[in-house]
Image (cartoon, rainbow, N blue to C red):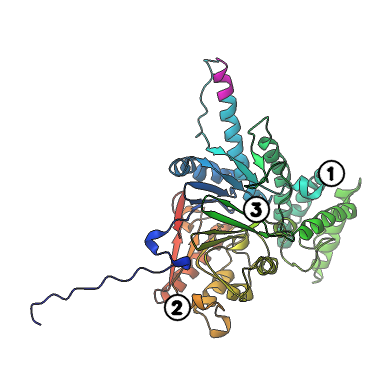
């Protein structure tokens, strides 16, 4: 009818897993700018869990100040800090946060004892930390932890000096582990009663002392407020194999001439490179005595703590740097793959989007509404190939499409913990991340509105589910 106004119907709110609507979202993940590491604050129902801490510089520059405000507005304390494994890009930011807490504790001690000259630290006072979930290197390896760290450290300059790309990458990984071992020991020291008195690996409903966290015959489940946690990995066998492998590796490399031995091996391999032969690094962390079958994934990464977090029907999978086959087995044995596939609200993409930790098979089996990648282009991560794999699992050819029916014709979002504009333009990782960023732009354009991309442009971005 001419002159009439047709009332437009409001679109129905999208129903999330568990029956929630978008307006009823309760779980929030604050994805921090964390250099090439992981750092995410998980929040719900007045509770806060800090998942890894990134690098110490990113903790100083992008995390510790907003963290105070975010926690203050949601319960006022950190219920737990979860360190997935000891690699520097996960643990050094946590160490910096604990150092901040110690500095404030020393200040309070002097002030409470009448020292009127004491000055307040120039850093924000961290929130109170109730618990730490962390399988320390010494607990996993035993009394040889120090010797292993020393041997790793001795290899780094020799590998760097070769100038060979293969060995330079190896030097980066070896140096990462070597540096993180003393940092992990310092984290454990600060948690003790005479420092910050933080309970370690004592889960809600348990009493101390804490022990190594692993998945045994009985499922490990606990709750913090409305957040329900299930420990997906590692297994007790994985930790046992890891300990045996590290100590066997130490025996095969240690001795008074360990540095000279490394140099001889490197020289031999350089000669083989010159003749076109392929060879392995004498300090290759991907192949070691005790565990086999996980090519491309280093020793500490296999032992990552992995949690499924559920709240009000929503699910977020926190993967650390674990390997895809290990993760699938863990999900199957904890009952999350009963139908042979799994659709999540949030998937933390393992190991910063490394191609060694994600393949097309995994992307078909495990899908999500939100995939988030932590990485700034260092070591090529997040890899464009991995971004493409996840895209193809949703909008690619049928042979690559997701198995979960919930993923059909469902919008999805890629989240990234930085953006290329904030990276030094002369750096290799700027070029690497820019390549990934341009790929994402093309995929968004060709997705016909099904894919969105979000990049952290200041300190953090909020992912609400």
Question: Residue placed at 52% from the left, 28% from the top?
Answer: 121
Residue 233 x %, y %: 69, 60
User: Between residues 335 and 14, which one lies in front from this camera angle?
Assistant: 335
Residue behind mark 1: 143
Residue 25 x %, y %: 42, 59
Q: The residue tagged with tag 1: helix, strand or loop?
A: loop
CA neighbours of label 3 inside 10 A, class few (<14), some (14 to 19), many (20+)? many
Residue 278 x %, y %: 80, 70
Residues at discs 3 and 1 in contact (Cβ within 8 Å): no
Question: Residue placed at 45% from the left, 78% from the top?
Answer: 409
Residue behind mark 2: 409
Q: Quadrant of residue 403?
A: bottom right
Mark 3 or mark 1: name the one nearer the start of the chain: 3
**Residue 110 highlighted magenta (yes or no):** yes
Residue 326 bears which disc, if any? none
**Residue 323 highlighted magenta (yes or no):** no
Image quarter in which the N terminus is found: bottom left
Find the distance from the CA under tag 1 to the CA under tag 2. 53 Å
Residue behind mark 3: 84
User: Between residues 356 and 215, which one lies in front from this camera angle?
Assistant: 215
């Amino acid at each position: 009818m001419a002159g009439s106004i047709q009332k437009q119907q409001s679109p129905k709110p999208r129903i999330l897993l568990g029956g929630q609507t978008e307006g009823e979202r309760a779980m929030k993940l604050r994805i921090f700018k964390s250099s090439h590491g992981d750092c995410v604050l998980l929040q719900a129902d007045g509770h806060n869990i800090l998942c890894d801490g990134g690098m110490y510089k990113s903790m100083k520059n992008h995390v510790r100040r907003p963290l105070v405000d975010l926690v203050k507005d949601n319960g006022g304390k950190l219920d737990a800090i979860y360190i997935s494994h000891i690699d520097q890009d996960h643990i050094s930011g946590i160490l910096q946060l604990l150092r901040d807490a110690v500095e404030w504790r020393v200040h309070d001690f002097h002030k409470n004892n009448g020292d009127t000259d004491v000055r307040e630290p120039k850093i924000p006072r961290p929130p109170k930390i109730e618990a730490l979930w962390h399988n320390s290197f010494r607990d996993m390896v035993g009394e040889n932890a120090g010797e292993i760290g020393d041997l790793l450290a001795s290899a780094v300059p020799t590998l760097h000096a070769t100038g060979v790309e293969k060995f330079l990458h190896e030097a980066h990984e070896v140096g990462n582990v070597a540096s993180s071992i003393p940092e992990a020991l310092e984290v454990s020291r600060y948690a003790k009663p005479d420092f910050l008195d933080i309970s370690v690996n004592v889960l809600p409903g348990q009493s101390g002392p804490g022990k190594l966290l692993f998945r045994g015959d009985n499922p490990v489940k606990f709750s913090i407020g409305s957040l329900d946690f299930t420990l997906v990995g590692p297994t007790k066998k994985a930790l046992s194999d890891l300990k045996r492998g590290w100590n066997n590796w130490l025996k095969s490399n240690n001795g008074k001439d360990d540095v000279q031995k490394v140099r001889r091996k490197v020289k031999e391999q350089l000669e083989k490179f010159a003749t076109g032969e392929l060879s392995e690094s004498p300090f290759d962390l991907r192949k070691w005595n005790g565990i086999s079958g996980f090519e491309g994934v280093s020793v500490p990464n296999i032992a990552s703590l992995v949690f499924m977090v559920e709240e009000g029907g929503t699910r977020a999978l926190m993967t650390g740097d674990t390997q895809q086959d290990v993760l699938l087995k863990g999900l199957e044995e904890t009952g999350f793959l009963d139908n042979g596939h799994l659709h999540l609200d949030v998937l933390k993409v393992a190991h910063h989007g490394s191609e060694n930790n994600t393949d097309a098979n995994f992307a078909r089996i495990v899908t999500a509404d939100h995939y988030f990648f932590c990485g700034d282009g260092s070591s090529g991560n997040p890899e464009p190939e991995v971004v493409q794999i996840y895209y193809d699992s949703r909008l690619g050819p049928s042979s690559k499409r997701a198995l979960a029916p919930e993923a059909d014709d469902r919008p999805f979002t890629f989240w990234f913990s930085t953006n290329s504009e904030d990276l030094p333009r002369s750096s290799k990782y700027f070029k690497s991340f820019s390549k990934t960023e341009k790929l994402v732009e093309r995929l968004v354009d060709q997705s016909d509105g099904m894919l969105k991309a979000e990049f952290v442009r200041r300190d953090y971005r909020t992912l609400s589910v």
